[in-house]
Amino acid sequence: MRFAGRAPAFALALVCLPLTAAEPVSIGYVDMQRVIEESKLGKQAFATLQEKYAEPQAALQKEEKEIMQLQQNLARDGALMSQAELDKRKGELQERIALIQRKAAMAQQELSQDQAKLGGGIIKPAQEIVTELGKERKLTAIFERSQSGMLYVEEDRNLTNEVIKRLDAKNAKGGKETKEAKPAKGK
């Protein structure tokens, strides 16, 4: 009878024993957005995108200005036009607006695809470096700062600067950008 009363306490002690002997949890975090923005690979990717999309963006801006000018002219001169002429010009203006909206949407979709390709060329080597750091520093876990829901972590747990430094060094040593990370030339 006495043993039956002590059995749950004994079982609880056996279960908790391994927990008290466990090693302390050690975590780190990385701000991957900063890695993308501040690393040499990230800056190269941004420059590539700017180079590719500067001309199409300028063309869209020029078209927008022309449309705005047409709208102003129509508002100014509309009272002097016949209803048929006014309707015709409004229809032409609406067609141009719809066309530029389609062009802008297509350009945005293409930009998003290129950003994803270039980002993958940065994220993969950065993740490898994060894994190396975790093993070197014997960390239990490394979180992504913006997606982890962390509200506070000591600054010395921030591995971002070290990831950027190693990524830049790896890139300088010949860790080349992969072919799939380069956006297609065009437009």
Image (spheres, rainbow, N blue to C red):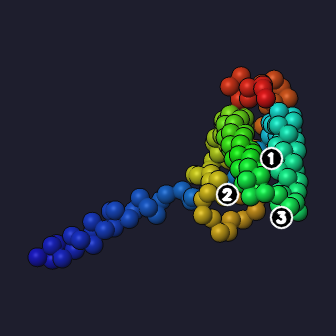
Mark 2–mark 1 Cα distance, whole angstroms, equals: 15 Å
Judged from the image, the secondary structure of the residue bearing numbered disc 3 is helix
- In this picture, residue 65 sits left or right of residue 27: right
Amino acid type, mark 1: Glu
Q: For the residue labelled by badge 2, is the local secondary structure a helix, a strand or a loop?
A: loop
Which numbered disc flags the more N-terminal residue, 2 or 1?
1
> Which of the image's four quarters has the N terminus?
bottom left
Front residue of 172/47: it is: 47
Q: Is residue 129 above or below residue 25?
A: above
Residue behind mark 1: 37
Q: Is residue 181 left or right of residue 66?
A: left
| SS under mark 1 | helix
Query: Which numbered circle lies on residue 79?
Result: 3
Q: Residue at x 83, y 26 (%)?
A: 173
Q: Tell me the residue that label 2 is attached to.
A: 145
Please state if 173 lies on the left or on the right of 1 as rendered.
right
Q: Quadrant of residue 134?
A: top right
Residue at 83% x, 33% y is: 52
